[in-house]
Image (cartoon, rainbow, N blue to C red):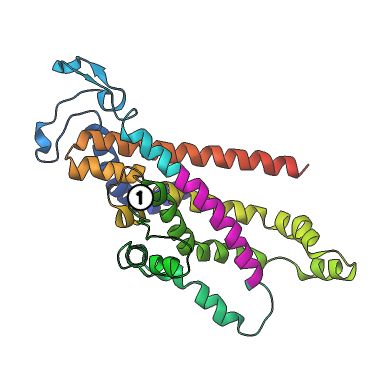
Amino acid sequence: MQRTRTAWLFLAPMLVAMLLVAGWPLARTLWFSVTDTNLNDLSAGRFVGWQNYVGAYGLFGNAGYTEGFWAGDWGLSIANTFKFAVVSVLLETALGLGVALLLNQEFRGRALVRTAVLVPWAIPTIVSAKMWGWMLNDQYGVVNQWLVDWGVVAQKIAFTAEPAYALWTVVAVDVWKTIPFMALLILAALQTLPRDIYEAARVDGVHPLRVFWRITLPLIRLPLMVAVVFRLLDALRVFDLIFVLTSNSSATISMSGFVRREMIDNGDLGFGSAAALSLTAIIFITAVLFLRAARVRLAEDSR
């Protein structure tokens, strides 16, 4: 009993800090999400129940019908976010695995190459987004100039403005920046693998591809899953990269971008809070489902 009281005594400051830092803002957001509060006057908000989420017919004095955000740009932002997350995480995982395998080999200057590979990840997201925005500009960007000079395209392309290219341009920039992160995590897992297994496979004359599929990949599967989960959660809350490259374009708006637009640009704190809580729920559910599927898969493979 004394040990339990002592443990709670030491935990109390941390719990109080978490309550103040996370609990209070979450409670305020929950309250705002069921009101029609405007950013210009926080005290004038009225309780509207679940209207911000699902809409209502003439409830609480509203004569018209409100659809809620599910049928509007919110649905589009969900689709954009998941497109971005799925494609970028798949590419980053595959390319990061390839880079990690190369960096795991013994060669002269390996330490220097490892350091150089981390440069894109070390650059702040805002800086890299502005840099790529200038390079991809359709008027003075060097990328467009190279494509025209090499005869790849007949005229310059507005990569960050054209709806057909904007989202995939953001994906490409994100992949360039985040490959080092995935490579670093995977390389750390590769460094822990026992060397005697590879020596035995080399002596037996096993093909390198077979060694990769039968030995390397199964042994790093758990760390690889952890890396994918971290990156997936980060991708689902993307905001800065998309906002800097494409601003408020509906072709690329993410869930976080939608929340920011409703709260800041439109001043609709109630609507934006409902979207923020929905974003949190979507990320949480996605993580749980992914981990559940991965756990079942790993259990089947271990049989």
Residue occupying image coordinates x 36% and y 39% = 77
299 or 99, which is in the foreground?
99
Q: Is residue 218 left or right of residue 271?
A: right
Residue 283: x and y, percent? 44, 41
Residue occupying image coordinates x 52% and y 66% = 180
Mainly helix, strand or loop, the magenta region?
helix
Residue occupying image coordinates x 30% and y 41% = 258
258 or 230, which is in the foreground?
258
Residue 241: x and y, percent? 36, 56
Residue 191 lies in quadrant? bottom right
- The residue sitting at the bottom extreme is 108
Residue occupying image coordinates x 58% and y 62% = 96
133 is higher (above) or lower (below) than 25: below
Q: Is residue 42 left or right of residue 20?
A: left
Residue 294: x and y, percent? 62, 43
In this view of the protein, can residue 251 be seen by the observer?
Answer: yes
Secondary structure under the numbered disc 1 in the rendered image: loop
Residue 112 lies in quadrant? bottom right
Magenta residues (range): 83-102
In this view of the protein, can residue 1 be seen by the observer?
Answer: no
Q: What amino acid is found at the position of numbered circle 1 in the picture?
A: Glu
Mark 1 = which residue?
A: 162
133 is higher (above) or lower (below) than 283: below
All told, the count of numbered labels is 1
Local crowd at mark 1 within 10 Å, few (<14), some, or many (≥20)?
A: some
Say which quadrant the C terminus sits in.
top right
- The residue sitting at the right extreme is 204
Residue 197: x and y, percent? 81, 66
